[in-house]
Image (cartoon, helix red, strand yellow):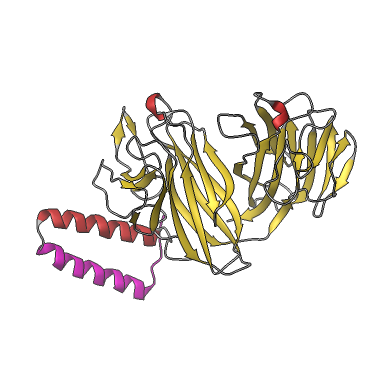
Amino acid sequence: MTISVPARMAAWFRCITLITSLILAAAPASARENALQKLGKALNALGNGQHSGNLIVNGSFEEPVVGKGRYLTFPAGQSFAGWQVIGSGSVSPISGEYVASRITFNAQQGSQWLDMTGPGSNSAAGVQQTVRTQPGTRYELVFYVGNVVGGSFGTTSSIEVLVDGKSLGVSRNASNSPGGQSWGQVKLPITATGNSTTIAFINRDPSNDNSNGLDNVSLMPAPATAVLTESFEAPVTSNYTTYNAGQSFRTATNTWTVAASGVDICNVQARREVTAFEGNQTLDLNGSPGAGVLATSFATKAGQKYSLSFHYARNNGLGATPARAKVEVLGSTPLLQAEIRHDKTVGPFGSYLIFSDDFVADGTTASLRFTSLNSGNAGITLDAIEIKAVD
């Protein structure tokens, strides 16, 4: 890849190089190595665009500089380079060249990342940062969750996200990259309510899981208007309303069609077995009868990349049975297919998880479809759905 650098910037880089060379020539060997590491990280940050628009400071945890193959530890109450450590236990900025059990713990961006579990603390530790925002402005929070599978590193990585103290749910990465760390991207829409906004991340891995990665955190003004949003606040119901196969219902923004069995729109004030992520209503994919299939269509542009995100939990009526569903985006061909699952290992029945994934449209329209994989009249609950164009 060739990068075009304006003349002034090229001269600026030459100036930095000259000054750095003079400083390093007079410095001891250990100081030269540390200075080169810091310079490399600074230039890498510029190359990755961290100076342009990202409100998060040190989002890739490149500071403080960690020795190759090593890590540092910060307990709750301490701070480092833009971040405050919260909760209980500790967190560890760690080198992307760290190796344990023949696994290389690579970074997602740059040369360092943050281990939310710390050096064996495995508790509800986390980090937070407060940034300046404009009230009423929509932002996009993007971050990556790192997962390592095997032995003392567990099978999944789970991070809870909070904005101004309100939970946005738990992001879970179950992917596996043998011999290395597998990173999964999460994108969340946020609307600022004040002149400052506090973003927090909390480790939600079990105590026997020794790795939970966080990297490449950014908060930027939302790049585009969503082409689909849904919170199921309409049609309004005082208890619950069932829609059966062949029926359609109109919400504030979309028309949904039930393709099989039934679904329920539930008022969470009346139906205590379910919770809403936002507002007073949610949708249960299992109506009366259950195992519902629900779909809606939306406009797209062929070749455009889109991001789908939504929150999901489980109906308490399932008891110990996991809630499961299939999510699909269908164009002329299947554009996205995934299975979601919510059970007691990831949190209480009403705690919301986050789904986030991308797809590329192949025509002018596409459909979003959810299919319950449970029987009976209790299943996955859905809320806060959003599809938007991305670069």
Residue at image x 64%, y 61%?
Answer: 224
Q: Is residue 69 above or below residue 42?
A: above
Residue 3 forms part of the magenta stretch = yes
Residue at image x 58%, y 44%?
Answer: 169
What is the number of callouts on the image?
0
Residue 330 in the image: x percent, y percent?
73, 40
Q: Nearer the viewer, residue 208 or 373?
A: 208
- Quarter holding the N terminus is bottom left
- Quarter holding the C terminus is bottom right
Residue 207 forms part of the magenta stretch = no
The answer, for residue 147, to whether it is visible in the render is yes
Residue at image x 49%, y 52%?
Answer: 200
Residue 352 in the image: x percent, y percent?
62, 41
Residue 71 in the image: x percent, y percent?
28, 43
Q: Main secondary structure of the magenta part?
A: helix
Residue segment shown in magenta: 1-26
Q: Nearer the viewer, residue 121 or 71?
A: 121
The residue lying furthest to the right in this view is 247
Relative side of 274 to 261, left or right:
left
Relative side of 341 to 260, left or right:
left
The answer, for residue 373, to whether it is visible in the render is no
Q: Is residue 36 above or below residue 379?
A: below
Q: Nearer the viewer, residue 150 or 73?
A: 73
Residue 165 figure quarter: bottom right
Residue at image x 50%, y 33%?
Answer: 175
